[in-house]
Amino acid sequence: MRDPASLLPLTPVLFHVLLSLSDADRHGYAILKEVAERTDGAVTLSTGTLYGLIKRALAEGLIVESRRRPRADQDDERRRYYRLTDFGRQVVAAEARRLEQLVASAWDKRVLRRSEG
Amino acid sequence: MAPPRRPAASVRLFKLLLRLFPAEFRGDFGAEMEADFSDQLRDARRGGRRPTAALWRRTLPSMLRAGLVQHAAAVTYDARFALRSMARTPAFTAVALLIIALGTGANAAMFSVVDAIMLRSPFPDPDRLAIVRVQGANGRTTSAISSAQFRSLRDHTSIFDGVAALGGGQRPILTGLGEPRRMNVECVTADMFRVLGTPPLAGRTFSADEDRPGAASAVVVSYQFWRRDFAGAADAVGRVITLNNVPTTVVGIMPRRFGGPFSRNNNDGWVPLGPTLDGQRTAGCAAAAVNVFARLKPGATLESAARQATDSAAIARLEDWQGKTGGRLTLMSLDEQTASELRTPLLALLGAVGLVLLIACANVANLQMERLFGRRVEMAVRMALGATRARTVTQTLTENLVLFLLGAFAGIAAARWTQQLIVGLLPAYVPHANDIEVSGRVLAATLAVAVLTGLAVGLIPAVQGTSPALMNDLRASTRSSSGRGGWTRRGLVVGQVALSLTLLVGAMLMIATFRTLRPDRPGFTASDKLTANLRLQGRAASASSRVFDNVFAHVQAVPGVRSVSASTYLPMSGMVAIVSARAGSSTQDAYSGVVTPNYFAEMDIPIVQGRAFVDQDGPGAPQVAIVNEAFLRKMLFDRAALGARVDVTFFDGRTESRQIVGVLRDTRSAGGDLKARPEIYMPLAQSSVQGLNLIVRAPNPGDPRLAARIRSALYAADPTQVLDRVMPMSDMLDSTVSTSRFGAWLLGTFAAMALLLAAVGLAASIAWWVSQRTREIGVRMALGARPATVTRMFLRQGVALTLAGIALGLGGAAACTRLLESWLYGVTPLDPRVFTASAVGMLAIAVTASYLPARRAARVDPVIALRTE
């Protein structure tokens, strides 16, 4: 098993993509929408960028294509659904912890203050 | 941007954008991306125009960027794969890299030479620089301008941004800086540097005052002089050197790329011409006729500027340098003037080196096909596993690209070295030689060529190596050398033979020219001699014979010198005084020489009748002369020569009557003349001359210490006299034929490279065919074929391909050799002897190259051959 830390740090966009798969399997457009909603539009992925990230995540074993598909009447056969692997989940968690530590350091150094929080 | 109205149009546009991605990526994700985009578009349209426009604004650049990123990723992957695969076949990689490095390196070196000489001017705005010429009333055009014409041009015209003159004269003697010698200075008006547009590297150029009579003497030195004679000292500016006994201050240093208006390589510096123009001769300058350079105003044309200058400077009323009036000015671009004679031959050489690259490419393509054939299992497996043919071709092309780029880098590294060899061979008159370097342009051009050739060369084997037919072959598990690939290989071999024969013919023409101009047996011995030119200065000139005797005695005493003789004329040196000789009723121009009594013996020129000069042929004795056999044939019609009288009329009109006392064997008078010219010699003691060529016989004439010792011996004898152009006689003879020597060496080298590559290509192909037909050979031999028959079978194949190549190559040569015409002497571009000899030579090389692998075929053991199948 590879060390999740070997892939850190993740780029912010890849982090968002993996995060959006952490609670459900989604297809490409669903990922785009979820990220946009979750960040209030602050992160807007475009189709071209997204599939570059998906290709990389597939190659690194962070995600796989999911075999579960919606009911036939809601399905578009052109679509593929992606699922976060266990390894992928570890990597997202490791990245989140890394970010947490960063933020903690900022508190310690009083770069961040309560009133701003 | 107005969004497309109908969904179909938008999706079509998106599909177009998808083409920006590599095919593989598109295959994996294209459909999904399209579905996503349709949904995005649908959702956006619900919100109206604005969200739709925003979607497009976001999508367009991101597709472009992401497409590029994916392409880069694919290339990186392929390049890594290529490096790994090259490492797996080190022998192939090494040979291919060597061939590519040779081809690209030679091209980079040659292009850097052409670039510096023809394509790159050392001056800013070179389009506005012109050399001024005068067309006389008789229609003849000359670039010799009289000083009156120049002064008028300088004073009366505002057509130009500036005009400046370059004078002539005798190079001044430099003392006080090492041993005394002549300094190669050009006499220029102070404006020259401004007209050419080159500021000094250090110090300054001449002030207006320094360009007038009576000013303190000043010199601007060249970068090369500064590095060599001042060892690049930081305080060189301000130092004082002595020129013709006048203390002269170094006021500035010019940059490396500056070689004066004609970009001469061997310039030591520049002195002001102004004082000489105004009647006070300084530093040996002369201004009877000058070269004039003008910088045109922006936008002015050569024709209109010449017309206006002719009128406003009243050129027609002024005397030209020959005292005639009625001339008018014409202007010629300085660049054109500088490179005109070299243009065609240099382009021919660049073409020749391009052919070498082509042959190298054919060779590599051949090797690649062989390697891909060996990897056909790997290819088939990859394609069976779903790699598209396009992907496999791309992969193979990338491998080639990596190979060619690596080879090109090796070639460029070698080019720096090759280039020095080329520069060493360049005739001294070639401009801008200081300027030749592997510049950014050369680098870019070489890499561009590498990429193009890499792709072109990769395409043939890539397409063939992945062809479905080959895969079928594989499935059938045959080792047949059926037509596929065979014809391409044959074509490549024929092409290589044809191209190298074209080069060979060109090289042979140049070599024939060189050997005509510089024969091995010119009729005298040059190899053990050193020559030096001595031109008497000042008071010594009036007491010449005493001064000469003194010089001979001192040089004779130098350790390592066997003997000293002297002559005003050296055969094949290109410098000669012509006299008019009259014997009986016939008059003829003859080359004349004034020699010491031992000259003929020293030069190993045999006396065939009568005697040589002796010490008794002095001033009081009867006036005598010695002639050569050609003189005899032309003037005396083989009548008895000895005792005949000849009237010799010199160029100054003086006539002397002399008696012939000896006849010489003919030598090659002028290098270019196949026949000897009539020659007449007179003894030094009975003549009055100001200059002589010393001929010093020494066992090792190339030793620079010998030249230095001779120079200082002379300096000790008479510090007012200096020896000039001290060099081995064979070097002096080489320098007179430097153009054909340059062409012969370069084309010869290119042809040798081409022949080697073609021979290797042919041998490799035959070896490959032998390996492909091992089983057939085994069967034949098992059935009783003799080894010689098998060898002959393959030899025949090699010879057949070579003959086809020769036919093509002779045609190619016939079409190309015209380009060399201006450099040829004694042969025509279509000389049948050269063409025949080249074809025969090519055939001999090809037979040898085919024989070695063909003989291996005969050594095949039928038992082993059949068992391995």
Image (cartoon, coloured by chain):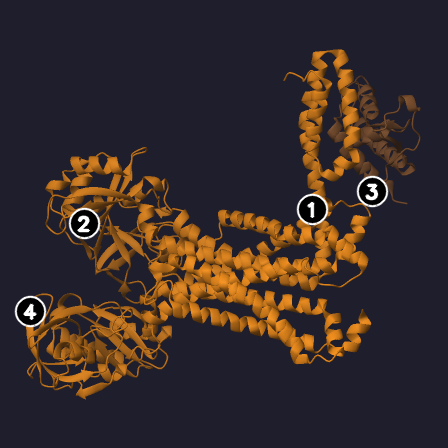
Chain colours: A brown, B orange
Residue bearing mark 2: B140
* Both labels 1 and 2 in a single chain: yes
* Both labels 3 and 4 in a single chain: no
Q: Amino acid at mark 1?
A: Thr
In the rendered image, residue B770, in percent from the top left (x then y), is placed at 69, 70
Disc nearer the start of the sequence (1/2): 2
* Both labels 1 and 4 in a single chain: yes
Question: Disc 1, disc 3: CB below 8 Å?
Answer: no
Nearest the viewer among B673 and B779 is B779
Residue bearing mark 4: B654
The structure residue drawn at horizontal position 91% and vertical position 27%, both measured from the top left corner, is: A24
Disc 1 and disc 3: Cα gap in Å? 32 Å
Q: Amino acid at mark 4?
A: Arg
Question: Disc 1, disc 2: CB below 8 Å?
Answer: no
Q: Amino acid at mark 2?
A: Arg
Nearest the viewer among B633 and B701 is B633
Q: Quadrant of residue B772?
A: bottom right
Disc 4 and disc 2: Cα gap in Å? 30 Å
- Furthest residue toward bottom: B610
Disc 1 and disc 2: Cα gap in Å? 62 Å
Residue bearing mark 3: A6
Label ID, residue B182: none
Q: Amino acid at mark 3?
A: Ser
Query: Does residue B330 appear left or right of residue B440 in this picture?
Result: left
Disc 3 and disc 2: Cα gap in Å? 83 Å
Question: Disc 1, disc 4: CB below 8 Å?
Answer: no
Q: Nearer the viewer, mark 3 or mark 2?
A: 2
Disc 3 and disc 4: Cα gap in Å? 100 Å
- Label 1: few (<14), some or many (≥20) within 10 Å? many
